[in-house]
Image: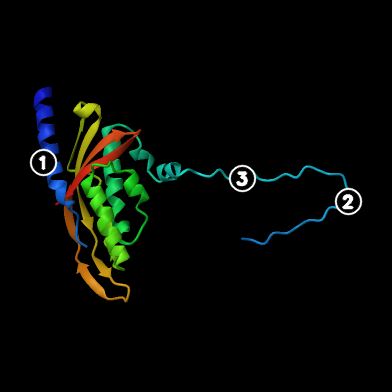
Amino acid sequence: MQGLRSMAWAAVLTALVATLSAGCAPEHAGTAVSTVVPASAPATPHSSRSPTPTLTEEERLLAMIPDAAKGDDLLAAVEMAKFYLLLQPDLYRGGDSALWEFLALPECLFCSSTVTSTQRRVQDGHLQVGGEYSIPEQVVGSVLDDVTDNTTTALVQFTFVEAPYQIVARDGTVIKAGDEGTYLVTIALRHVGGLWRVYAAAIE
């Protein structure tokens, strides 16, 4: 049974990665006050607040990830898959891609092509208005495999709804508009560096 399950898993992942070659996605201060102390006055300790610790970039990004997605089990993989997809619409609005890239493995063509295409649109002055994603609580399917490449791997599939959107140019001209649409997404993740990270995805 284990052999059949592994063969089925390999077949699904092979087909998924092949589909990803095209990187499919839906179209579309206050003022300081000084105090003078008389010279004759004895020096007294001055209490001050401790400086706020500065977060590293990795700490900043980790703080943005929901706790439910930080485990190493299948439930956490499902939550990470949903969270990752929900980051995509903001990229079309010129949002920061740092977290999207942080959660993507280098081999994820879908992830890198999304960054390239959205940054190109933003540079051209074409920003998306609307187009938020909503995801049902129940996923279509999810499976965990812990024998592939000695790395725990998860495959998650679910539907999501994209709200109506417009692509607007700098001068306010609407270049493109899209109605509400329902899509099926399949996301493959690997547990690397203590986090579920995306290494493949496809949207139908």
The earlier-in-sequence mark between 1 and 3 is: 1
- Determine if residue 1 is in view: no
- According to the image, label 1 marks what residue? 15
Identify whether 129 is placed above or below 78. Answer: below
Q: Residues within 10 Å of mark 3 (few under 14, many from 20)?
A: few
- According to the image, label 3 marks what residue? 51
Q: Residues within 10 Å of mark 1 (few under 14, many from 20)?
A: few
Q: Residues within 10 Å of mark 2 (few under 14, many from 20)?
A: few
Which mark is nearer the camera, 2 or 3? Answer: 2
Horizontal side, residue 124 vs residue 157: left or right:
right
Separation of residues labelled 2 and 3 (CA atoms): 29 Å
In the rendered image, residue 188, in percent from the top left (x then y), is placed at 21, 40
Separation of residues labelled 1 and 3 (CA atoms): 52 Å
Horizontal side, residue 78 vs residue 59: left or right:
left
Q: Specify the amino acid type for callout 3.
A: Pro
Identify whether 28 is placed above or below 7. Answer: below
The earlier-in-sequence mark between 2 and 1 is: 1
Q: Are marks 2 and 1 in contact (CB under 8 Å)?
A: no
